[in-house]
Amino acid sequence: MRRTLATFASLGALTLAAPGLAAGGPDEAGCTIELAREVAGIATYAAECHWPVAPRFVAAIVGDPQQIAAASTSLVSSTRLADGRILNVHLAGWPIDDRQSTLAIEKTALADGGLLLSYTHAPVQAPLGGGRVQARRDDGRWEIRGEAGGGTGGGTRGGTRVLYETTYDAGGSLPVSLVQRTVRASVAESLAEIRAAAELLAGAEAPHTGANAGARTRTQADTGE
């Protein structure tokens, strides 16, 4: 099922096909998602995830518009503009018009391979494409840090702790209450997709690393080193 999300950094969006998930313990993606606050009917959701993959792989997905667009099942396009802003088009699903949002991004790389990333609805939005509706708000932040544990990926030890927060208003004529009660389900699905993409990226590197290690072992045995 294709669901809506606002991606490259932002995940909170409307998911009209699915009801909101009940708050509680970690879901199948290893994330706990809670309602952080609500102002004028617009909800802010916060997620904490613990993933058994090195932080550099999660950061590689979250910090790259092409990577996160490939991971998402509901991002029509994510384009880096000449001034560094990111233009996203989010799939809403027929008969609802797709949503467009232009984000201002700030990123800080961390020594452990992690990433701090914040995004805001840019003061100047790109001109709307045909058949799209302007999202009214799209703000949030990521914190991706390493933590001790059984991480995978290219011999890199340790897992990743992900903190994510999103505030999203889809705009248009849709009732705010209809959109807001489905945001959590969209965030949950999107985080699961990002985890899967990071694990796939780590897995793609691991065999290569293993092959190199095997080659070194054979060489050492042959030469006696």
Image: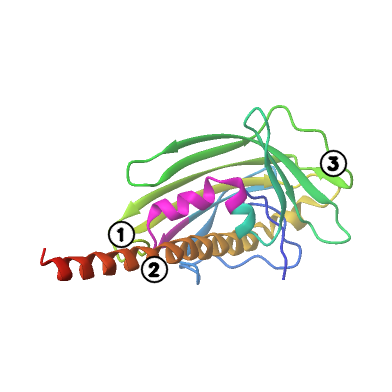
Label 2 Cα neighbours within 10 Å, binned few <14 / some 14-19 / many ≥20: some
Q: Residue at x 39, y 68 (%)?
A: 207
- Residue 105, compared with residue 92, is above or below; it is above
**Residue 46 spot, x, y in % from top left:** 52, 52
Of labels 3 and 2, the one closer to you: 2
- Image quadrant where residue 222 sits: bottom left
- Image quadrant where residue 185 sits: bottom right
Q: Residue furthest front?
A: 223
| Whole-number angstrom distance, CA of label 3 to CA of label 2 | 43 Å
Q: Tell me, for residue 207, which label it has, or none.
A: 2
- The quarter of the image holding the N terminus is bottom right
**Residue 183 spot, x, y in % from top left:** 66, 57
Q: Is residue 99 left or right of residue 118?
A: right
Q: Which residue is mark 3?
A: 129
| Range covered by the magenta-colored residues | 48-67
| Residue 61: in magenta span | yes
Q: Secondary structure at mark 2?
A: helix
Of labels 1 and 2, the one closer to you: 2
Q: Residue at x 83, y 52 (%)?
A: 174
